[in-house]
Amino acid sequence: MKPLVVLTAKYPKIVREILSGLCELVEHPSEQGRSEEEMITILSEADAAITLLSDPLTRNVLSANRDLRMIANYAVGYNNVDVDAARELGVTVTNTPGVLTEATADLTMGLILAVMRRIAEGDREVRTTGQCLWEPLHLLGTSLTGKRLGIIGMGRIGSAVAQRARAFGMKVTGTHRGEPIYELLATSDVVSIHAPLTSETRHLMNPETLWAMKRGAFLINTARGALVDEVALCAALDEGQIGGAGLDVYEDEPDVNSRLLAMPNVVLAPHIGSATEETRSAMARIAATDVAMFLRGQRPSHVIV
Ligand code: DGY
């Protein structure tokens, strides 16, 4: 009997091409915010699965089906996986690093530009009024040239953002994992977060760190929503402590804080950092190839656990 591989969403077609003949594939429609119970049901017969970053792979889920031997998480981040439980239970876990660096860095620059140059506000105005008004003092934003970008997390994506920002004439300061961030916060005109979400980094941006930023500076987050305490962010935006924010990720995805929805100086993207044809296909190729290697008895190339 062929092994059963569960796909928890509709992934790019390369997944089927790579895995065809090797296993039986069962595809579930994409669904955000699945509960543990739903995951247990979906994975009840699986030997391996390709999973979404929103799928909770908790100890309960991983231990419910003792035949489940491998998870290929279709993301570079894996905060949805209980890696300690996977290790103890002998479940191999892989991710998709490297291939989403450029796409995520591009989107980060897009958000920096959109917030500082008020592009989304302008778009809303043109659609609402049906007019393009040129006035000397209208929709004035902030120039990027000469401003300092502080990058929290100078890994692959952070470094790619730094490269782009320098091309826009920005000065760049960056911190690496575990380094203090207060000087960066106090001196940066824009702060962009590129850190993984762990128990140590949850609410990295909180009342204290938000108020340690330069008054009126901008905050960009394309990493994980829970790195930012959104209640504190809303307060900081309300009080003008933060001049604007560009967000691709949210604390309670798929839900978005209603206060953020009402703020004109916040640009909201729907977690599209990696959403290009090229990148999503490359992620699918990595995930499926790792599953194929595992099914053939080889060690997959992108093992986390
Ligand atoms: C990831 O891979 O972690 C990204 O958030 C997906 O876009």
Image (tube, grey):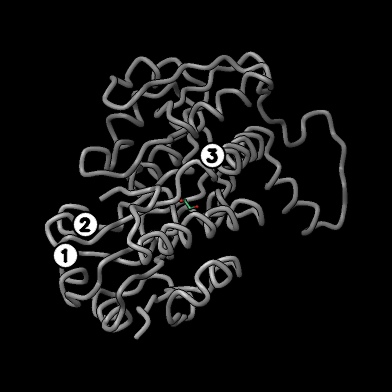
Side of 69 where 175 appears, left or right: right
**What's the amino acid at mark 2?**
Asp
Rendered residue at 16%/65% (across/down): 59
Q: Are marks 2 and 1 in contact (CB under 8 Å)?
A: yes
Under tag 2, what secondary structure? loop
* Vertical position of residue 92 compared to residue 154: above or below: below
Residue toward you, 280 or 233: 280
On the image, the x and y values in percent for residue 177 come to 31, 27
Residue at which label 3 appears: 101
Residue at which label 1 appears: 59
Q: Residues within 10 Å of mark 1 (few under 14, many from 20)?
A: some
Rendered residue at 75%/51% (across/down): 125
**What's the amino acid at mark 3?**
Thr
On the image, the x and y values in percent for residue 30 come to 48, 75
**What's the amino acid at mark 1?**
Arg
User: Which of pointers 2 and 1 lies earlier in the amino acid sequence?
Assistant: 1
Q: CA distance from mark 3 to mark 1?
A: 30 Å
User: Which of pointers 3 and 2 lies earlier in the amino acid sequence?
Assistant: 2
Under tag 1, what secondary structure? helix
Q: Determine which quarter of the picture holds residue 66.
A: bottom left
Q: Residues within 10 Å of mark 3 (few under 14, many from 20)?
A: many
* Vertical position of residue 40 compared to residue 288: above or below: below
User: Which of pointers 3 and 1 lies earlier in the amino acid sequence?
Assistant: 1
Q: Residue 82 shows which numbered tag?
A: 2
Side of 154 where 86 appears, left or right: left
Side of 63 where 123 appears, left or right: right
